[in-house]
């Protein structure tokens, strides 16, 4: 008899964005003439940068010619991309990351989901609250979280964000082995200063813990004082893994490309206390379970590091940041307290009522889809997230409708 992994039964019935899609589908069925504007899931709407399109076409031609055809590539990614990443995302910012530390993949969701499987089942885990649900759900599946009650998993340590700490919670008061961090943050849009990141790095070093740092939104940082990478903090090269994505940077949500940085200097330990090189473990996992992102996609990703590609990515991210500014202005007119939306494509709104109530109010009265903060964890209750990923006229129309529907 085939029996299931019973840890799955501790999960919420479905993934947050599936629940939202169901509510929207129901509303749409009841109001077939209503044009619903989606500012819910963080999915880009603008086309790929022209430099990536050109590279995709050229790569298709390579695949059509026996002389340049590529079959399986290196599981870790092609050198042309790994070198470009190391140079432009790290060395140009004074951070010494080698191309060998970079593992190209088909998405950060998978990488942040999969990384935990390198560690033993009894590891103590800390997650930010509110949190990108993937960090939690994958540890639930792996059996590390205990049971769920009152909105919490018994064995997880929640680092609670709030208006008071600007949604940058301090490191846990107790010792944990693995910490997930995300800055600029999904869902709150909060960013962390160097000093705030240093506190996490110091904590990890003190406790021999590992930081999994999700930097999928770093391309939205405009404040020159804010760090883009955890490796800008001395010591992080010994205790942190960083996840980056081309999705929100260059519009790759439908194309799929991301990478994970695992410096050779990060040490982890076997049960008997003997040291191991984390990069070797991830390399073993990656080369066993993954056959490399596709060649044309990696060419398209590498193209964003050309001079024209960099300018195009800047334009794309500026476009969504301008949307975020429109959202912030509309909410200010309504007197809402907001967070994020600057150096981040997400606006986090104090709903002044239960999250799902404001979600349904905005859907029913304005035909606008947002994301209820409660879906991101207990500290998200009472908030909603509004995503800046949409076309300009839709964002403007959404804010006009919201102001009309719920304004004074
Ligand atoms: C979100 O809306 O939170 C994002 O789309 C999640 C993701 O990137 O997987």
Image (tube, rainbow, N blue to C red):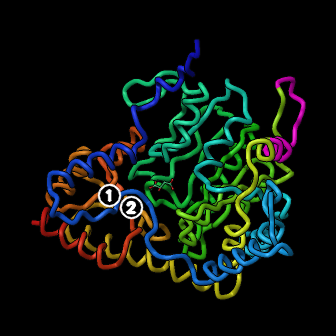
**Is 385 included in the stretch rendered in magenta?**
no
Residue 396 in which image quadrant: bottom left
Residue occupying the point 42% across, 44% down: 376
For this orientation, the residue located farthest to the right is 274
Is residue 93 visible from the viewing direction of this image?
no
Can you tell which quarter of the image residue 12 is in?
top left
Q: Percent position (x, y) of residue 228?
A: 64, 66
| Lateral position of residue 205 relative to residue 32, left or right | right
- Above/below status of 92 relative to 15: below
Q: Nearer the viewer, residue 240 or 121?
A: 121
Q: Which residue corresponds to the image point at 66% horizontal and 42% vertical from the top-left?
A: 114
What's drawn in magenta, residue-wise? 271-284
CB contact under 8 Å: marks 1 and 2: yes
Residue 341 vs residue 255, the one in the foreground: 255
What is the number of callouts on the image? 2
Residue located beneath label 2 in the image: 339
Q: Residue furthest left?
A: 408
Q: Residues within 10 Å of mark 2 (few under 14, many from 20)?
A: many
Horizontal side, residue 283 vs residue 318: left or right: right
Q: CA distance from mark 1 to mark 2?
A: 6 Å
Residue wearing tag 1: 349
Q: Earlier in the sequence, mark 1 or mark 2?
A: 2
Q: Position of residue 317 (x, y in %)?
A: 51, 76
**Observer able to see residue 329:** yes
Q: Which residue shows up at 80% across the image and 66% down it? A: 70
In this view, the residue farthest toward the bottom is: 308
Q: Quadrant of the C terminus?
A: bottom left
Residue 381 x/y as whole percent: 33, 43
Task: Check disc 1 and report its element: helix, strand or loop.
Answer: strand
- Asked whether, in this view, residue 123 is left or right of residue 136, the answer is right
């Amino acid at each position: 008899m085939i029996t299931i992994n019973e840890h799955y039964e501790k999960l919420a019935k479905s993934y947050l964005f599936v629940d939202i899609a169901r509510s929207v589908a129901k509303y749409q069925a009841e109001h077939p003439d209503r044009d619903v504007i989606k500012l819910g899931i963080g999915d880009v709407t603008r086309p790929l940068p022209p430099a990536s399109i050109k590279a995709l076409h050229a790569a298709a031609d390579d695949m059509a010619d026996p002389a340049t055809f590529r079959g399986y590539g290196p599981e870790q990614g092609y050198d042309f991309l790994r070198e470009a990443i190391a140079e432009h995302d790290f060395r140009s910012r004074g951070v010494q990351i080698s191309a060998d530390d970079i593992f190209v993949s088909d998405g950060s969701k998978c990488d942040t989901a999969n990384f935990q499987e390198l560690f033993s089942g009894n590891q103590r885990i800390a997650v930010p609250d509110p949190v990108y649900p993937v960090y939690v759900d994958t540890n639930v599946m792996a059996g590390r979280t205990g049971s769920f009650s009152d909105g919490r998993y018994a064995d997880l340590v929640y680092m609670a964000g709030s208006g008071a700490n600007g949604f940058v919670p301090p490191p846990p008061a107790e010792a944990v082995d693995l910490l997930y961090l995300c800055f600029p943050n999904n869902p709150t849009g909060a960013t962390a200063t160097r000093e705030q990141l240093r506190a996490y790095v110091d904590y990890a070093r003190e406790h021999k813990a590992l930081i999994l740092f999700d930097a999928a939104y770093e391309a939205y940082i405009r404040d020159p004082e804010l760090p883009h990478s955890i490796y800008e903090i001395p010591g992080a090269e010994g205790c942190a893994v960083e996840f980056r994505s081309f999705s929100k940077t260059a519009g790759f949500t439908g194309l799929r490309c991301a990478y994970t940085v695992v410096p050779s200097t990060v040490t982890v330990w076997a049960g008997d206390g003997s040291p191991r090189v984390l990069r070797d473990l991830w390399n073993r996992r990656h080369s066993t379970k993954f056959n490399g992102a596709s060649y044309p996609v990696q060419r398209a990703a590498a193209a964003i590091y050309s001079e024209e590609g960099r300018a195009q990515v800047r334009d794309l991210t500026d476009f969504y940041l301008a949307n975020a500014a429109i959202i912030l202005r509309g909410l200010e007119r309504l007197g809402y307290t907001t967070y994020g939306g600057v150096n981040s494509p997400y606006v986090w709104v104090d709903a002044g009522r239960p999250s799902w109530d404001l979600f349904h109010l905005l859907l029913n009265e304005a035909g606008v889809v947002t994301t209820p903060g409660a879906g991101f964890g207990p500290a998200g209750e009472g908030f909603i997230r509004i995503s800046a990923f949409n076309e300009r006229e839709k964002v403007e129309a959404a804010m006009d409708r919201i102001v009309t529907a719920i304004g004074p």
